[in-house]
Image (tube, rainbow, N blue to C red):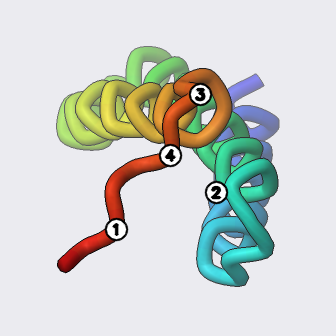
Amino acid sequence: MTEILEWFATVAGIAAAFMIAWDYGRRVTGWGFVLFTFASVSWIAYGLMDEEGGLMTQNIVLFGINLIGVYRYLIRKKKPAAAA
């Protein structure tokens, strides 16, 4: 089970990074954050099962950051103000 979580989290994290880096628009970026969120949950579960405290702690923080990304790109209706 841990090997499945490990590889899902790895592949999902790589795919999400590409989705965000390619900058194909707000919707694709938002779904990249959704995928990052699932990867973080998988890493947290893996960290719990394999007693990897550092990995688990890092991904708890990343989970919160990814939720902010999901909110900003998929839920919030107003686009962020452009930098001056």
Q: CB atoms at circles 2 and 3 under 8 Å apart? A: no
Within-10-Å neighbours for mark 3: few <14, some 14–19, many 20+: few
Residue named by callout 3:
77
Calculate the distance from the C-alpha at mark 3 to the C-alpha at mark 1: 15 Å
Q: Earlier in the sequence, mark 2 or mark 3?
A: 2
Residue named by callout 1:
82
Look at the image and tell me whether residue 32 can be seen. Answer: yes
Calculate the distance from the C-alpha at mark 2 to the C-alpha at mark 4: 25 Å
- Label 2 sits on a secondary structure element that is helix
Looking at the rendered image, the disc whose residue lies closer to the viewer, 2 or 1, is 1
Among the 4 quarters of the image, the one containing residue 20: bottom right
Looking at the rendered image, the disc whose residue lies closer to the viewer, 2 or 4, is 4
- Label 1 sits on a secondary structure element that is loop
Residue 25, horizontal then vertical, whole percent: 74, 66
Calculate the distance from the C-alpha at mark 2 to the C-alpha at mark 3: 26 Å
Which amino acid does the dot numbered 2 rest on?
Answer: Gly
Which amino acid does the dot numbered 3 rest on?
Answer: Lys
Residue at x-position 79% and y-position 56% = 28
Calculate the distance from the C-alpha at mark 4 to the C-alpha at mark 1: 9 Å
Residue 2, horizontal then vertical, whole percent: 67, 30
Residue sitting nearer the eye, 26 or 44? 26
Residue named by callout 4:
79
Residue named by callout 2:
13
Within-10-Å neighbours for mark 1: few <14, some 14–19, many 20+: few
- Label 3 sits on a secondary structure element that is loop
